[in-house]
Amino acid sequence: MIKTYTTNEHGFQDALSVRKDVFVREQQIDESEEIDGNEDASLHFVLYENEKPVGAARLREVNGEGKVERVCVLSSHRKKGLGEELMKAMEESALERSYSSLILYAQTQAEDFYKKLGYSTTSKEPFLDANIPHVAMKKVLKSST
């Protein structure tokens, strides 16, 4: 089950918990880079399995587009389709907010995951973000109505 939260709601701490496990502990990203000044401007998504938070992401508006950020699933729950479930929920939320497209910066090791979901790489070459190679990607959303 996926729930959404703002920073003033208790569930926001569940999102931070998953992000700290994946980005700070597993990928060794400094916590000051992981938790940034965009938290309050974002809608936070938390994926639960048996009431335990196992995935998280956030969505915010940047120049009229939705920007997907901080997508992560605990290592114990990967390769089960949960990341795809999380992305689908964010795309639905983006359509509800009338975003015509979503952009994201994907770690290069996750580029194929996003390509399978219909995202196209828009950067010519990888760039470093938090000392990890990333590529810029974009997906034009199609409303089902």
Image: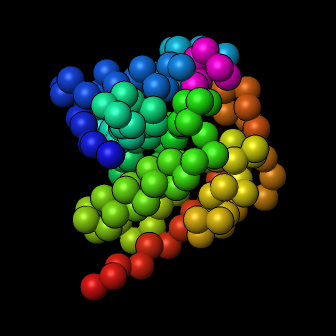
- Whether residue 26 is in magenta: the answer is yes
Image point 37% across, 56% down: which residue?
89
Residue 115 placement: quadrant: bottom right
The quadrant of the image that shows the C terminus is: bottom left
Residue 48 lies, with reference to residue 23, above or below; the image says below
Residue 128 lies, with reference to residue 59, above or below; the image says above
Colour scheme in the image?
rainbow
Image point 55% across, 52% down: which residue?
81
Residue 69 lies, with reference to residue 76, above or below; the image says below
Please state the total of marks drawn on the protein image.
0
- Whether residue 120 is in magenta: the answer is no
Left or right side of 50 for 26 = right
Q: Nearer the viewer, residue 38 or 43?
A: 43
Give x and y (percent) for residue 110.
Answer: 69, 47
Give x and y (percent) for residue 116.
Answer: 65, 65
Left or right side of 137 for 65 = left
Residue 42 lies, with reference to residue 31, above or below; the image says below
Residue 64 placement: quadrant: bottom left
Residue 121 placement: quadrant: bottom right
The segment highlighted magenta reads 22-27
Give x and y (percent) for residue 28.
Answer: 67, 16
Give x and y (percent) for residue 51.
Answer: 31, 31
Image point 63% across, 46% down: which residue?
79
- Asked whether residue 1 is in view, the answer is yes
Q: What secondary structure is the magenta-colored segment mainly?
A: helix
Q: Nearer the viewer, residue 138 or 10?
A: 10
Image point 40% across, 23% down: which residue?
16
